Image (spheres, helix red, strand yellow):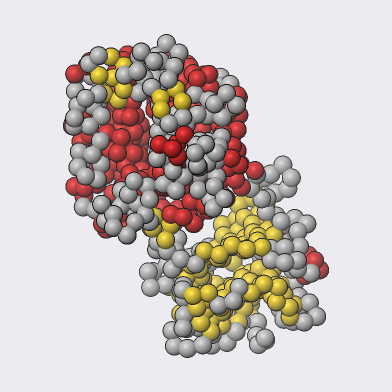
Amino acid sequence: MIRAVYKSFFISICVGLIVACTRCSPAAVYRDDFSHESGTWMAGAGWSLAKTPSGASCYASDGEKDSFAWRKDWRVGQSWVCEVDVSIRNERSGIATCGIAFSKDGTEPYEKLLVNIQRHSTPVTLVRVEYRAEKWRTVLATGWMPGGDSSYNIKVERRAGSSRLSLTVLGDKGLNWRFETPDINPSVLNGIAFPGLRAGGGEVQYTYFSLTSPFKAPDGLKSMAIDAGDDLLKHYWTGGPSTGHIINTYAGVPGAELPLERGGLWERATLLITLENLYRATGDRILKERIASDWRRTKSLYTADELKTPGVQVHPGVDDCGWDAWMYLMIHRCTGDQYALECAKALVSSSFDRWLDDKLGGGMWYNDDRKCKSLYAIGVMLSSMRIYEVTRDEAFLKRARSCYDWIEENLLRPDGLYWCDRNSSGPIGADRPDDIREAGSVTFLGGNMGMGVMHAMLYRITGQDIFRKRAIRTADAIAAHLTDGKGVLLDDRDAWANGTFVGEWAVRVLNLPGIDKKHRELLINTARAIRIRARTPDGYYGGCWNGPPDGPGSPWSVVGSRPQQIMTSAGAVNVIAAAALLDSVK
């Protein structure tokens, strides 16, 4: 180790100090993006404020010497989580090092804990955890991993009483590494007080640094959602969080020769909608980066006409348009991108123009065949309602309300559920009203949830109690007729779509005044069943939410909706995300 002579100085940084009270103890949440003047550092040679090539503020080291910068006004407790975003440049030769450091008092040579990323110019990457008591000890080393990522997100967590650390390292070129260290000397973990940064061997730029201490680990539902989200990302994401994207799929699966070489747009929508709900439930800003990164790629591959026009190859039916518009709006809510809102407005308006007419008394045709009008219009309707919430454009409320009134008149069943389709002869399946089962049904769970959300939105907009009562009526009908008899929701008609609107169901319907708590319990029970019994050993999720996930015992797998399809897995995981959302968003 090269000792550095430390000097104290004030630099321009941004410290967001939030004291969040919990039932146990207050947690201090410190964040630094190096953009405003406010904090004190103890730093060695070579550190300065700078700008990245993209113009972001950063705290940079020239890398000439192995050097540390300590944040002396932040302190770790017995439980904490620390996170950084960092980039490395060492194209010339040798090994560059960056990472998070912890020290007893922010000076050498006292106890110190280091979580290092080492990048060789070849390029390959190594992750190493080491600590110093009487001498240096390495407790974890990955070995050299190929890829040569140049930007990393590093997160380190210690839970109260634990002698181990949990690590996550994500790279911009696809490095995705999670691990728990072996036991570390408790005197070291209990003795460290100050967090800091390390740099050496190359140009290192830190753009984000945060500490939460004491850290309260996610509860069971959030932890379950995080794990399920990781399963999805493992199978359906390629590249780094800020530069990668959802893999191309068609009919739900990737392939070297896809009928649509860019993949199916609505298929990735099912995953993006799930990621946005996971972001709302967990606050994980890396999920936000992934959503923005995939959207940048989509905007580069599709023309405006393709993104905004119904009835074309990208979205040929009312359901494709609804799911895509809902995706655009979730992207807008998450990132603020105005083009996403523009695409949603154009696609929704054009869908109404194309398929809404007064035949059969009103409502929207399913597609250009005009054989039936369908509950699958719910995606366009909810998107139109969401656009009204954002813009207050009455035209979107009026047309959504027109479709809503038609469904209430023509698809509402005596038991409080909704028929899925209607043609000139009436509701399709009226001769078999009790035909409600996995992989086949005359109703549609996703559409019923969507109508519940419509009721709740209209209640909030108008203040009229009739809409609140209708939402509760829909929830009661689902609980009575769309479960498997074992306390788990029935993925009845469409394993690719039934989970689409469950996040809004959790937020808007299950928090209504007067809603029975049994409906929250039903959602939570379903989420737990999916995680335990609908997950394959390699982390895909099946359409039979109470199991089995795959094979001849799964009606969904028998008819072709397999766990390996992006829509099947994403829809199931969205139920888990929705359960985690219950107490996160009001």
**Residue 262 picture location, percent across and down:** 28, 55
Examine the rendered structure and indicate whether residue 44 appears above or below residue 482.
Answer: below
How many numbered callouts?
A: 0
Front residue of this view, candidates 302 and 156: 302
Camera-nearest residue between 563 and 511: 563
- Report the residue that reaches farthest toward the front: 552
Can residue 195 be seen from the camera position used here?
yes
- Identify which residue is drawn at 25% across, 52% down: 259
Q: Is residue 254 above or below residue 346?
A: below
Q: Nearer the viewer, residue 235 or 297?
A: 235
Residue 389 on image: x %, y %: 36, 33
Q: Is residue 76 left or right of residue 295?
A: right
16 up-or-down from 225: above or below? below
Q: Residue at x 61, y 47 (%)?
A: 223
Q: Is residue 401 above or below residue 380?
A: above
Image position, residue 55 (x, y; %): 39, 69
Q: Nearer the viewer, residue 12 or 571?
A: 571
Q: Quadrant of residue 459?
A: top left
Camera sees residue 98: no
Residue 584 in picture, x, y percent from top left:
56, 40
Q: Residue at x 44, y 48 (%)?
A: 564
Q: Residue at x 65, y 43 (%)?
A: 220
Task: Quarter of the image for the N terminus: give it.
Answer: bottom right
